[in-house]
Amino acid sequence: MSITEQETFYWGLKADEAFAHFLAGERARAAGLFQDVVAAIEPLEPIINTEPVRSFHRRVMAVVTVANQVRDGHAAETEIGLASGLCSDLTVMRDEREQPGFDFLVLNLVMLGLDHPANVDLEHWAERVRRSRLLMVRAAAAEPLFRLAKLTGKFEHVIADGVRQLDALTVRAAIERGDRAAAFQETAEEVPTWATGAELFITFRIVASCFEAAARGEAVHLPIEQWRRDIPERAAVASICEAVDDAEKWLVRPVGDPWEAIRGHAIGVSERCFAALSTSMDERCPPERLLIAHAIWLLAFDQKLLRDETGPPVSRLVAAQWLGACDRPILLNSPRITVPAIREAIASRDAGWHKVHRILSAALRAVSLPSNHWVSVAIRAWATADSAN
């Protein structure tokens, strides 16, 4: 297995061409070209530390990394200038620092391709990322892999990806503390204990997955059994188990009346959210109950990470469900006034929770709730805070 200087130059030109297209705004085309280059390097992985593959791989890695930085608005002009035309340079790189590894290049390709899924075989490369043993890849992969899950609607790997990330972050933290004994447990059955509250990153993604699936009309198909198989046997997984159980109870195999569960009060946060979601998905749900269900989400999703993850699907759900309510104007107060106001809020260019606040503010006038009801008070307060921001 080898690569000639001519072949190296050819693929270097391809990488430089991809970066030029990327800077010119032709980013979908650039992503496809970068994929071709990465695919050309993949069979050379066994000799990736041998020249000329070593230097070529490092140059491509640098250029794809800069492309991601440009996309995120973090690249300096000097970095962009250094990356332009870099890959077709056949000079041997004398940098003796450790290679970042081919899987890290693949992860960067996935991150770049998420904006252009038609041009990059994301699911193929995602599986490569999941198989990686590189600590830096495992520590960074869960977020882009979750973005891919939301893009495709395939959530079966959410817990496994999250566990892999938390294990890697825990090991890396042990290394930084100088705890070498813990650091070397990366591939052992036992890993250092997660930091307190770390499991919430996985719990939040389960909740966001459920709302995304519901917004797609696919909540009944949530991969509950796969999720259960992927929960590690550790002490700090109670919230993960609870979220999976509650999702099954109210979304996949509903038992009982979700509205009665909400009124009972003596239930956990995830069960209250999923019971509210189940209530809202009932086409016969009265407007007052619908508004209360939506307000429960506003109250429960107060952590920034959870709000960021749930904003898009919740806004789609709230918009669709109040659009349905507008089709039954007889159930709304002053429908000649409130229905146009709700429809205007739904049609607004606001996004995420800003859109949710606007729709619920309009919907509040269409239902019969006392002005001192906690929902009325909360929606007015959220709307005021939203306007101030």
Image (spheres, rainbow, N blue to C red):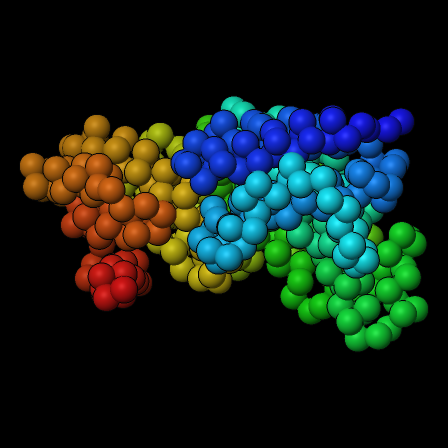
Q: Is residue 131 above or below residue 162?
A: above
Q: Is residue 144 visible?
A: no
Residue 276: % across, % down: 44, 46
Q: Is residue 384 left or right of residue 263?
A: left
Q: Is residue 389 above or below residue 250?
A: below
Q: Is residue 253 left or right of residue 322?
A: right
The image quadrant where one finds the N terminus is top right
Q: Is residue 320 left or right of residue 74?
A: left
Q: Which of the pair 187/241 is nearer the observer?
A: 187
Picture quarter containing residue 14?
Answer: top right
Q: Is residue 189 visible?
A: yes
Picture quarter containing residue 174?
Answer: bottom right
Tally of numbered discs: 0
Q: Residue furthest left?
A: 336
Residue occupying the point 65% across, 37% down? 88
Residue 166: % across, % down: 72, 57
Residue 186: % across, % down: 86, 56
Q: Which of the pair 186/160 is nearer the observer?
A: 186
The image quadrant where one finds the C terminus is bottom left
Residue occupying the point 24% across, 39% down? 346
Q: Residue furthest bottom?
A: 177
Residue occupying the point 61% across, 31% down? 13
Residue 76: % across, % down: 48, 58
Residue occupying the point 82% across, 32% down? 44
Q: Which of the pair 231/386 is nearer the observer?
A: 386
Q: Which of the pair 203/36 is nearer the observer?
A: 36
Q: Is residue 193 left or right of residue 244?
A: right
